[in-house]
Amino acid sequence: MENLQSNQKRHTNRFHYSQDQVMEKPFDWAQIRRLLAYIKPYSKTLLPGAIITMLLATLIRLLIPILIGKVAIDIAIATGNTRYLVYLVAVIGGLYVLSYAANIFRIKWVNILGQHVIYDLRKALFSHIQHLSHRFFDTRSAGSILVRILNDINSLQELFTNGIINLLTDSVMLIGIIAILFFLSPKLAIAVLIILPLMFFISTRLRRNIRRSWQQVRMQKSRLNSHLNEAIQGIRVTQSYAQEPENTDYFEVLNRDNFESERIATKKSAYFGPFVEMSNAVGTVILIAYGAHLILTNQIEIGTFVTFAFFLGMFWEPISRLGQIYNQLLVAMASSERIFEFMDEEPNVKEQKNAKRFSEMRGDIRFEKVVFAYNSDRIALHEIDLHIQAGQTVALVGHTGSGKSTIANLISRFYDPTAGAVKIDGEDLREVRLQDIRQKISVVLQDTFVFSGTIMENIRFGNPEASDEQVREAARIVGADDFIQRLADGYETEVEERGNILSAGERQLLSFARAMLANPRIIILDEATASIDTETELKIQHALQTLLQGRTAIMIAHRLSTIRESDNIIVLEQGRILEQGSHNSLMDRQGKYYELVKTQFQSEEQ
């Protein structure tokens, strides 16, 4: 235990970036109503059938005890009318069969309704997250996002498949039972229900505590999933540094926290059931004692007492279920807060309502006194003025953190400038449709992402409408066709997530083929050749000439030998342009670029 506590202290700061917090809010019915809005599309199809069958089954349940107690005992049995009793038994049997059929259809329709709602909610959340800006993903781990889409929405499934209809059923049942109890005997009803105010008072005191516990469960699950995602993605780094024991200790801390939060929440939620049973026991004692007195003093009949006992037994059943439903609502409240936190997140990069269409793009880029800051403490670009002519190949060089990738991100409008304007063909990117911008700009990164699927599907990601022959042609142009043909199933070879069966160079060639297929007007190569060996690099140099022909190209490269032929080389330092020009002119100037080339040349010689 001491070791576990020590690990917990040591690892506490690893979640400083997490946005997950226990939200201190009262129970918010508006939040629940917002969830229920997802039922609206089915209000004329599945929902009416579910409600009608629910009301029918509830009405039958309320009618049967009256037929048994008041009619069968006080009339048929008391008068010895056997024939009437036989008819009554047949009617009650028929009602049970009808109730059984109604419940079958209710369960069927409610489950279909619940699955539709969960499907729609998950689709809406995923679609919304897809359109959020890069800044959103900069501050949240992938595991945390996965928890919202999977676990948090899954936790709502019970509410939508059973909870809502059960809430209506039990509410109608409870109101009906209370009305009938007071109709049968107001005195006895008051006596047995006197426990309700105390029960309500105690249960309300538990609500905030239970809700907070379930919020804590959701937060701990988010942390656990976040670490699992990180641990699996980084397993090679972990093993390379022999950090398996450290990682296991870290997981143990998170697993223990998750276990404890789940145990505490379940324990608190479990208080309600025994409390209802105790209340039932107290009500039953009062019923027997006071009910016997009323029978002996001829204030009620035996059939009325039996009917009352039936309904009292039925009374605590919906009370108990309502407690369980309330627990479901607490879980739904905690999950919905986390889901709608993301749904309410607005993209930092917003498209104007009347955004212009960008039907044709030449690729002329201008930065006009552009300032950009990731946060108030870190200014990445300082009043950058830059002109990249259409069809030019421009290289951005400089040390890490000089602003190269920031310029590329602004051109793709992954971020908006803090001040100034970025324009393409004279149009401020903030006034143009995002889809039009990004369809005409391709970005090739150093770390190529390969999706699960076939080689063909991965290349076609650049243009989903492309034919198989167009995919093969794009691969041939960039030199990827040779290694693809050597694979067991060629273009139909299945690759797992991140393409681990491919080498770094092969993955990079796939990304070039993907970009070629997209046929962009502007192409950004962000360290795109850094992971490629010299032989492969020579192979794609020719492909790049074809790929970049007639297109505006922005190349970010630490390997300066790859940018010698660029039309313009821009040297950046701490967010400012120090110098720019061709390779030869910058070398003649013997400034910062000259120093970078000289340093790299000496490094390669050693």
Image: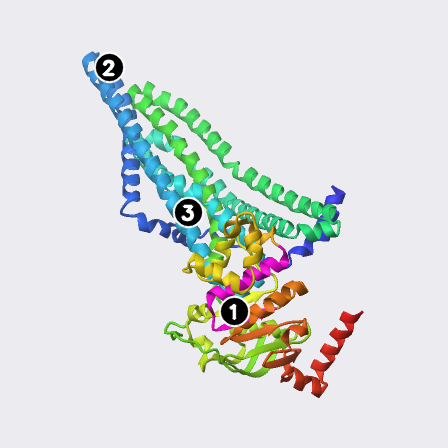
Residue 80, percent from left and from top: 21, 11
Label 2 near label 1: C-beta < 8 Å? no
**First of labels 2, 3 by sequence position:** 2
Q: Quadrant of residue 307?
A: top left
Q: Secondary structure beneath disc 3?
A: helix
Label 3 near label 1: C-beta < 8 Å? no
The residue that appears at 27% across and 34% down in the rendered structure is 56
Amino acid found under the numbered disc labelled 3:
Ile
**First of labels 1, 2 by sequence position:** 2
Is residue 495 shown in magenta? no
Question: Nearer the observer, disc 1 or disc 3?
Answer: 1
Q: Residues within 10 Å of mark 1 (few under 14, many from 20)?
A: some
Assign the C terminus to one quadrant of the image.
bottom right
Mark yes or no: residue 21 visible: no
Q: Look at mark 3 in the image and give the residue it sits on.
A: 118
Q: Residues within 10 Å of mark 3 (few under 14, many from 20)?
A: many
Amino acid found under the numbered disc labelled 2:
Ala
Q: Quadrant of residue 435?
A: bottom left
Left or right placement of residue 324 versus residue 579 in this view:
left
Q: Which mark is residue 78?
A: 2
Q: Nearer the viewer, residue 436 or 41?
A: 436
The residue that appears at 58% across and 54% down in the rendered structure is 498
What residue range appears in magenta?
503-526
Q: Look at mark 1 in the image and give the residue it sits on.
A: 414
Q: Secondary structure beneath disc 2?
A: helix
Against 136, residue 95 (above or below) is above
Amino acid found under the numbered disc labelled 1:
Phe
Question: Nearer the observer, disc 2 or disc 3?
Answer: 3
